[in-house]
């Protein structure tokens, strides 16, 4: 479930801050779309959850459904390197969180090739992969 708070969805700046897997709540830390910052921890005790089977399997399933990638670009004005999503802004937080546990979208395309994709349809209100 993606929810919009104060324009984050409409501005394309949504990030993942919590996730649930196997009945357990997890916190996702970091800043923006940078997959190298932050980590996933158990909300209950703050323990690192980057290798929890529930977290990894949930994010693997999520990232395999995404077409979005995260790329590092240089801001022309500031010359600062920034991570930016290419694709659907609601998929970007899933791709960033998956990167935090080692699932890189480019590797996933090779290891788990997509057999078929049925594009999003407003009448079906879903996309199939």
Image (cartoon, helix red, strand yellow):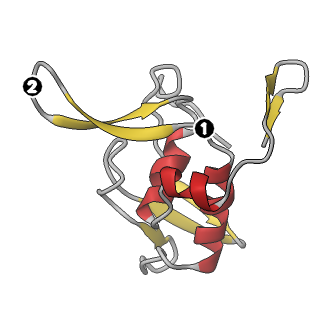
In this view, the residue in front, 100 or 3, is 100
Q: With 29 as the anchor, is 24 left or right in this view?
A: right
- On the image, the x and y values in percent for residue 99 come to 44, 57
Q: Is residue 17 visible?
A: no
Q: Which residue position holds label 1?
A: 67
Residue at the location (45% across, 66% down)?
102
Measure how far apart labels 2 and 1 are at the Cα level.
29 Å
Tell me if mark 2 has few (under 14), some (14-19) or many (20+) residues whose alpha carbon lies within 10 angstroms of its own. Answer: few
Q: With 121 as the anchor, is 17 left or right in this view?
A: left
Work out whether 9 lies above or below 20.
Answer: above
Query: Which of the two marks, 2 or 1, is nearer to us in this view?
Result: 1
Work out whether 60 lies above or below 51.
Answer: above
Looking at the rendered structure, the number of numbered marks drawn on it comes to: 2
Residue at the location (52% across, 20% down)?
10
Choose top left, top right, bottom left or bottom right for residue 2: top right
Work out whether 110 lies above or below 54.
Answer: above
The quadrant of the rendering that contains the N terminus is: top right
Tell me if mark 1 has few (under 14), some (14-19) or many (20+) residues whose alpha carbon lies within 10 angstroms of its own. Answer: some
- On the image, the x and y values in percent for residue 73 come to 25, 33
Q: Is residue 36 visible?
A: yes
Of all residues, the one furthest to the right in this rendering is 123
In this view, the residue in front, 13 or 5, is 13
Earlier along the polypeptide chain: callout 2 or callout 1? 1
Q: Secondary structure at mark 2?
A: loop
The quadrant of the rendering that contains the C terminus is: top right
In this view, the residue in front, 15 or 86, is 86
Q: Secondary structure at mark 1?
A: loop
Q: With 89 as the anchor, is 38 left or right in this view?
A: left
Q: Which residue position holds label 2?
A: 78
Residue at the location (38% across, 65% down)?
39
- On the image, the x and y values in percent for residue 88 come to 56, 29
- On the image, the x and y values in percent for residue 91 come to 57, 39
């Amino acid at each position: 479930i993606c929810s919009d708070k104060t324009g984050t969805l409409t501005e394309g700046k949504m990030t993942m801050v919590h996730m649930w897997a196997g009945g357990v709540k997890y916190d996702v830390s970091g800043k923006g779309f940078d997959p190298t910052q932050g980590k996933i921890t158990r909300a209950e005790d703050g323990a690192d959850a980057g290798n929890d089977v529930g977290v990894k399997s949930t994010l693997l399933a999520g990232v395999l459904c995404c077409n979005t990638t995260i790329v590092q670009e240089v801001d022309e004005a500031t010359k600062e390197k920034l991570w930016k999503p290419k694709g659907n802004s609601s998929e970007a937080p899933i791709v960033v969180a998956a990167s935090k546990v080692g699932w890189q979208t480019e590797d996933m395309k090779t290891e788990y090739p997509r057999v078929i994709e049925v594009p999003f349809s407003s009448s079906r209100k879903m996309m199939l992969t």
